[in-house]
Amino acid sequence: MEILKDYKVHLLALLVVVVCEFIGKQTFWVITVYPMLYAMIIGGAISLPKLKILKEKNMHHASSVMIVTLMLLIAKLGVAVGPKINEIFNAKLALIFQEVGHFAGTILLGLPLAMMLGMGREAVGATYSVAREPNIAIVADKYGLDSPEGRGVMAMYVCGTLYGAIWMSILASIIARLDIIHPYALAMGAGVGSGSMMAATLAPISDLYPAIAGEIKAYATAANLMSSVLGIYIYILFSLPFASFLYNVFNRFRNKKSGAK
Amino acid sequence: MKILETIFLLILVAIIMAAGNTIGYQINFIDSLQALGILVIISIMGFLISKFPVFKKLPVILWVSVVAALVSSPIFPGHNWVVEITDNVSLLAICTPVLAYAGLAIGKDLALFKHISWRIIPVSLAVFSGTFIFAALIAQVTLHWEGII
């Protein structure tokens, strides 16, 4: 019951929520920012170690409560699935194939960049997934957390916690406004397998298309469900070996080039 | 995490969410609480299922999703009622407390972040963008192909 009794954390959270909801959403140029983003930024400012408002222990409590809040978020998204269950069954092929995009996209965009910037085997751990808790466990199991791969996945985990949601919300806001990709497809893209990042990606999309917001939530949740069920197996059997293989291929190129100089 | 503590935390957070929903989206507090009450019950059911020996292997989030999808689908007797009541709470109002708590926990990760090379920043942005953009592009093609869009 220690976490429940940490009134400091809960009062601060309530205060942050009340202030952010009072401000409401704001639009600058093509980017719309939502109360959830100021909540993360204000919360982050309060927790700065320099200010000494929160102790390390309070921060660990906040992090545990966050996991509990995710259950309510997922429950809210889940009740959008039931009414649209027939439409989701119609889109089953799209749901299966978009998972390939989730897994391949991280590696194809991330790994070459990491290697161009001169990262070593860290690149494998950093780019094989979006580096949430299950992904850390998989790398820990295969390479150990003290290995380069382990440092890579941990570094990415921290980045995801610090600014993953903020970045995804801005990116989704811009891409949705370009109006090239259908909102249903964007919704499936939002199911990245992390609750907070998914919520941050989904907000601007469902806000831009209020008439079909129900369908958008349903597709995103179905895609996220797909990631949770298939995810662990795909990460172990495909993503991690593929990232490692691609690293070796690129590394041969890199060595040849530097050898020729 | 302990079962009772989780249940109490769910109730506490639901009250914070209801306050946000009332302020930000002008839904009266009692209706907001009622909507969140249903979501709390769904979460507790999912959470309890995830404590069973065989089901333990899969994440809690998955079971919560499954329970929520079941009670809102036509096979469940009260599904219309569940959907109607939970419509009173905005998805955005739920997101704000999630990220407020995430923010309050940031301080403990900053020290770790300082040890990481700057290179991880562009790489992480590419990874997050890649998973979203590639999945959306593939979904666009397949949805078109299935005749849905």
Image: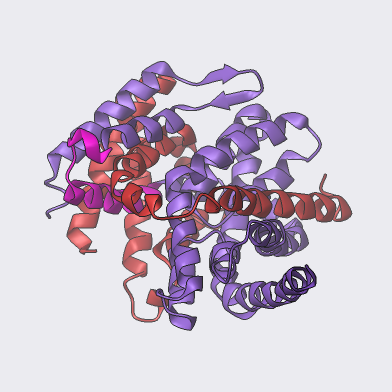
Chain colours: A purple, B red
Left-right relation of A224 to B49: right
- Per the picture, the main secondary structure of the magenta-coloured stretch is helix
Depth check, front residue: B6 or A193: A193
Please, is residue B54 above or below residue B16 in the view? below
Left-right relation of A12 to B37: left
Question: At 60% from the left edge and 53% from the top edge, which residue is drawn?
Answer: B123
Q: Pick out the residue farthest to the front.
A: A261
Give the magenta-colored segment's residue range: A48-72
What is the quadrant of residue B6 in the picture? Answer: bottom left
Percent from the top left, x then y, of residue A231?
57, 69
Question: At 76% from the left edge and 58% from the top edge, which residue is drawn?
Answer: A94
Where the C terminus of chain A falls, by quadrant? bottom right
Question: At 81% from the left edge and 36% from the top edge, which residue is drawn?
Answer: A180
Percent from the top left, x then y, of residue B89?
43, 33
Depth check, front residue: A122 or A164: A122
What is the quadrant of residue B51 in the picture? Answer: bottom left
Where the N terminus of chain A falls, by quadrant? bottom left
* Residue A22 part of the magenta segment: no
Depth check, front residue: A170 or A90: A170
Query: Does any portion of residue A219 appear in the rendered image?
Result: no
Total of numbered circles in the picture? 0
Please, is residue B96 above or below residue A239 in the view? above
Left-right relation of A170 to A261: left
* Residue A69 part of the magenta segment: yes
Question: At 77% from the left edge and 74% from the top edge, which residue is drawn?
Answer: A256
Query: Does any portion of residue A195 appear in the rendered image?
Result: yes
Percent from the top left, x then y, of residue A198?
54, 47
Depth check, front residue: B123 or A129: B123
Left-right relation of B148 to A39: right
